[in-house]
C-alpha cells in the first residue's frame, strides 16, 4: 500500500480500484472479482460485473499505451537505462536515475503547477465549465524559470461568471487518462448490452450515464477529464461519451507523433499570444500541446467522427492519422534492446517485441480504442497477467505469468524507487 501511494505522484491511477505501475509494468484491478466474472461469462450476462470489466479495460489501456505508442517506447528506454544504472551503482550513473525521476514527474504535472477547489455551484453537461488557456514555464532545481520547458495549461471557471476554480497543465497523463476512460465507457456499454431484459438494461444504462457524467465534473479528477472538456468546448460536442471518444482518438495520435512530426505542427491563430513559447513547445515535443493544437485546428464537429479526426490532423499540417500510425508501427517493430543489459531490461525487451503488433491492432479498432472484445480476441495473446481483488494473478493467456515474472519486476521497481529517493536526499534535498 505504501508503494502504491508513492506511485500516484507520477502516474494516473485509481488506486482504490486499479493501477498500472510503469517501472514494474504490473497491472492491478483491485475490484475484479474473478469468480463472479467467470460466472457472469458462463451466464452470458456481464451487467452484474460491469464495474469489474470497466476497470479492467481502463488499466489494460494504460498497459497497451505504454507498450504500444512512441511515447511509451521513449519512456521504456529511460526506465531501462535507470535499471542498468541501478545495477552498476556508480556515481557516473546518477544522472540516468535523476533523468527518469524528472520524466516520471512530467507524466502527471507536479502539484506546484496545478490547483483545484470546489466550484461554488454544481456543473453538468447542461452547464459546462468555462475554459481559458495560459502558459507558464518550469522551475529548475535552482529556482530559475526554464523558458525552454514551457507548460500549456487550461484554466477552468464557473459558468457563467468564469471565476477560476482550477488550473491544469495538459500533461501526458491527461492524454493517457482520456484514452482509459474511453475504453472504460465502451466496456460499460458492452457489459450492459449483454443483459437480455430491456427494463433492467435501461435502468443500468441510466445509472452508468449518471456515474460517468458525475466523474466528468468532479473537480478533484480535473487532470483525468481535461482533454475531453477541451475538445467538447472547441468542437461543440456536448455529449460526454462522444467528446471522450474523439479526445481519446486524438490523444492516440499525439502519443504516436515522431520527433520529425512536431516541427510540422501548425500553430493555431489563437495561440499567437503565447509568442516564443509556441516554438519551444514544438522543440520540446510536448504531446499535450500537440493534442490541443489539433483540437483548435480541427474546428467544429459536424457529425462524422473519423472525418473530424482526419480534419484535426490534416489542418495541423500532420498529414493523415493512418500515415502517423503506420510510421509509428514501423519504428516499433523492433524491440528495445540494450547490450550488456540485465534481467530487468530483458523483461522490457521481451514485452516491447509485441509493440508492433499492439499498435497495428489498435489501428483497426474503432477510433483506436481498446474494447473488451479486442482484448479477448486480437490482443489476448499479449495481455499481461493482472492482480484481482484477492491479490491472485489472472492470466487471459495460459503460461503468460511464467514469462512475465511479476515478483522479480515488483522487487526491482521497489529497489529502484528506494535508490532514487536516497539519491534525491543528497542532490536535491528531497
Image (cartoon, helix red, strand yellow):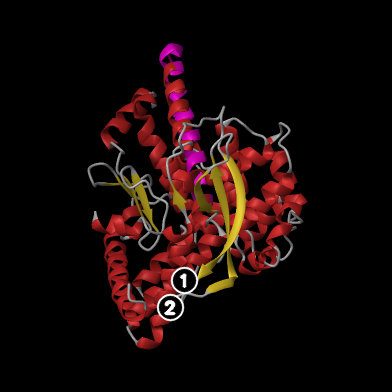
- Contact between labelled residues 1 and 2, with CB atoms less than 8 Å apart: yes
Q: Give the answer, above or below, for where 324 lies relative to 81.
A: above
Mark 1 nearby-residue class (10 Å; few <14, some 14–19, many ≥20)? some
Q: Quadrant of residue 104?
A: bottom left
Q: Quadrant of residue 99?
A: bottom left
Measured Cα–Cα span from mark 2 to mark 1: 8 Å
36 left or right of 63 in image? left
Residue 45: x, y in percent? 38, 23
Tell me the residue at 68%/63% (across/down): 278
Q: Which residue is mark 2?
A: 96
| Near-viewer residue (278 or 63) | 278
Q: Is residue 368 visible?
A: no
Q: Give the answer, above or below, for where 37 lies relative to 329.
A: above
Task: Specify the label residue 78 is tagged with.
Answer: 1
283 left or right of 371 in image? right
Based on the picture, tell me whether residue 199 belongs to the magenta stretch. Answer: yes
Q: Give the answer, above or below, for where 318 lies relative to 308.
A: below
Q: Secondary structure at mark 2?
A: helix
Residue 283: x, y in percent? 65, 69
Q: Is residue 355 visible?
A: yes
Q: Quadrant of the C terminus?
A: bottom left
Residue 19: x, y in percent? 36, 50
Based on the picture, tell me whether residue 178 belongs to the magenta stretch. Answer: yes
Magenta stretch prevailing secondary structure: helix
Q: Which residues are magenta?
A: 175-202
Mark 2 nearby-residue class (10 Å; few <14, some 14–19, many ≥20)? some
Tell me the residue at 48%/34% (across/down): 185
Amino acid at each position: 500500500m505504501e508503494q502504491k501511494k508513492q506511485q500516484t505522484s507520477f502516474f494516473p491511477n485509481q488506486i482504490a480500484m486499479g493501477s498500472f505501475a510503469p517501472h514494474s509494468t504490473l497491472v492491478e484491478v483491485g475490484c475484479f472479482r474473478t469468480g463472479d466474472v467467470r460466472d457472469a461469462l458462463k451466464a452470458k450476462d456481464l451487467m452484474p460485473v460491469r464495474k469489474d470489466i470497466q476497470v479492467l479495460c481502463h488499466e489494460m489501456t494504460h498497459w497497451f499505451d505504454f507498450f504500444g505508442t512512441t511515447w511509451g517506447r521513449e519512456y521504456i528506454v529511460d526506465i531501462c537505462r535507470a535499471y542498468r544504472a541501478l545495477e552498476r551503482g556508480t556515481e557516473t550513473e546518477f544522472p540516468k536515475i535523476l533523468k527518469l525521476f524528472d520524466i516520471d514527474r512530467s507524466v502527471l504535472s507536479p502539484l506546484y503547477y496545478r490547483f483545484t477547489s470546489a466550484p461554488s455551484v454544481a456543473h453538468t453537461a447542461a452547464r459546462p465549465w468555462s475554459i481559458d488557456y495560459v502558459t507558464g514555464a518550469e522551475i529548475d532545481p535552482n529556482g530559475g524559470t526554464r523558458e525552454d520547458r514551457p507548460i500549456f495549461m487550461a484554466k477552468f471557471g464557473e459558468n457563467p461568471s468564469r471565476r477560476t476554480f482550477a488550473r491544469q497543465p495538459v500533461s501526458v497523463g491527461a492524454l493517457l487518462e482520456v484514452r482509459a476512460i474511453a475504453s472504460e465507457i465502451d466496456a460499460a456499454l458492452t457489459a450492459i448490452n449483454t443483459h437480455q431484459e430491456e427494463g433492467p438494461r435501461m435502468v443500468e444504462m441510466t445509472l452508468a450515464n449518471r456515474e460517468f457524467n458525475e466523474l466528468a465534473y468532479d473537480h478533484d479528477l480535473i487532470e483525468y477529464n481535461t482533454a475531453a472538456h477541451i475538445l467538447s468546448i472547441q468542437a461543440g460536442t456536448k455529449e460526454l461519451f462522444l467528446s471522450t471518444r474523439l479526445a481519446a482518438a486524438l490523444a492516440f495520435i499525439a502519443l504516436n507523433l515522431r520527433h520529425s512530426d512536431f516541427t510540422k505542427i501548425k500553430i493555431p491563430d489563437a495561440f499567437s499570444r503565447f509568442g516564443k513559447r509556441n516554438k519551444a513547445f514544438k522543440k520540446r515535443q510536448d504531446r499535450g500541446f500537440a493534442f490541443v493544437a489539433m483540437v483548435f485546428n480541427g474546428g467544429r464537429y459536424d457529425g462524422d467522427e473519423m472525418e473530424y479526426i482526419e480534419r484535426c490532423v490534416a489542418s495541423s499540417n500532420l498529414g493523415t492519422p493512418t500515415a502517423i500510425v503506420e510510421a509509428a508501427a514501423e519504428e516499433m517493430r523492433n524491440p528495445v534492446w540494450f547490450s550488456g543489459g540485465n534481467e530487468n531490461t530483458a523483461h522490457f525487451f521481451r514485452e516491447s517485441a509485441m509493440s508492433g503488433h499492439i499498435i497495428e491492432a489498435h489501428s483497426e479498432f474503432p477510433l483506436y480504442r481498446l474494447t473488451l472484445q479486442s482484448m479477448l480476441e486480437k490482443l489476448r495473446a499479449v495481455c499481461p497477467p493482472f492482480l484481482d481483488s484477492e491479490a491472485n494473478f489472472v492470466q487471459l493467456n495460459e503460461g503468460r505469468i511464467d514469462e512475465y515474472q511479476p515478483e522479480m519486476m515488483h522487487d526491482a521497481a521497489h529497489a529502484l524507487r528506494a535508490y532514487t529517493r536516497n539519491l534525491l536526499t543528497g542532490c536535491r534535498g528531497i
